[in-house]
Amino acid sequence: MTDTLRVAMIGHGFMGAAHSQGWRVAPRFFDLPLMPEMAVIVGRDVAGVAASAGKWGWNESATDWRDVIARDDIDVVDIVTPGDTHAEIAIAALEAGKHVLCEKPLANTVAEAEAMNRAAIAAAERGVRSMVGFTYRRVPAATFARDLVAAGRIGEIRQVRAEYLQDWLMDAEAPLTWRLKKEHAGSGALGDIGAHAVDLTEYITGEHVTSVSGVIETLVPERPLLGEGVGLSGTASAERGEVTVDDLALFTGRLQSGALASFEATRFRTGRKNALRIEIAGSLGAISFDLERMNELEFYDATQPDLEQGFRRILVTEHDHPYLAPWWPTGHMLGYEHGFSHQVRDFVTAIDEGSAPSPSFADGLHVQRVLDGVERSSAAGSVWTSIAG
Ligand code: SOE
């Protein structure tokens, strides 16, 4: 008989749907050491959260996260709310002895992320685990890229190009959702998607960004206020409000080895829908990853005879890969949602083993410091700014 892990999820937007998929599907494909039970989903809108519970498969819904965290029959708190609430919920949950999975970016400010990391360290001493949801680490081709780099297959890293490009804000009349307000989102493209580019670069290279020089800019400074509806599906009202976050972030980062990495994050790159691309050039070869072609990794092996060289496309669906065996026959492709099942598998396994899940809150704090460094650099005229910690 497998023990049960009773999960409460706080929030029910886009990430709520994705995380629900992970909790629901992971135990049906992976042999998990603990069986997640989708106990309760929490949101402020009574009817909305009840509908989400029914649709996504949660046993019940509730409107007050504090009541839920106080319950003895909850083991895990999964936070998928906007960034301004992460710190308060995560710290309260960890102090109440609940394991915490928190969406990225970890928080809206470095101070909040530091407080969360302190709470995570104290909780770990009591056997309580925490993890930040940089889910793309769990796309098999990205994990494989990390393995190739760690095995020395591209040699010494010489240059990195990392970009996360979307275009859902290119319409200047798209409404002012929470993702466009600093008080809710902390930052714009920088934190929403640039955070992924930084984390994935650091994960694949195994190196931290130690200093940055960058510029951030708001391209459409005013937008219609949100009328009826929520999130991306909300309609525009006649009134307008100020966009208080960046639309575009361009920066250069120095890695620990001294190599330079260039980063771009924008939700205005016409035609690019979800292009998280990382290309790493090394002394022995290169790799290139593109989330819009997430089952593939391009690998250039410069140790091969000159006449045989060229980027080769590796279909990363082989069952030798730890994430792939439980899914479909080779070549039958995974999608966006599978990363959330892999995340659940790894988090639940770490809870069962009593090991530290990865990425940790310390990793989330480090990314937060990089984001903060980019903002400070931009404000100071793109001066090189070192990343503390
Ligand atoms: C969640 O991980 C997330 O970063 C969203 O917040 C972005 O908007 C999405 O496009 C990528 O995933």
Image (cartoon, helix red, strand yellow):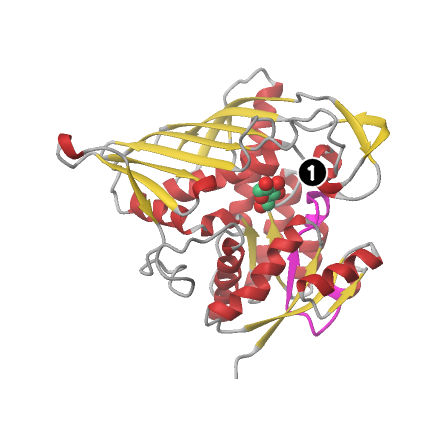
Which residue occupies the extreme top position in the image?
A: 381
Q: What residue range appears in magenta?
A: 68-87
Q: Is residue 278 above or below residue 356?
A: above
Which residue is the site of mark 1?
185
What kind of element bears circle 1?
A: helix
State yes or no: residue 73 in magenta. yes
Mark 1 belongs to which amino acid? Ala
Residue sitting at the far bottom:
1
Label 1 packing within 10 angstroms: few (<14), some (14-19), many (20+):
many
Closer to us: 341 or 245: 341
Quarter holding residue 18:
bottom right
| Mark 1 Cβ inside 8 Å of ligand 1 | no
Residue visible at 60% across and 26% down in the picture: 268
Asked which quadrant contains residue 45, the reply is bottom right
Tell me: 49 left or right of 368: right
Q: Nearer the viewer, residue 10 or 341?
A: 341
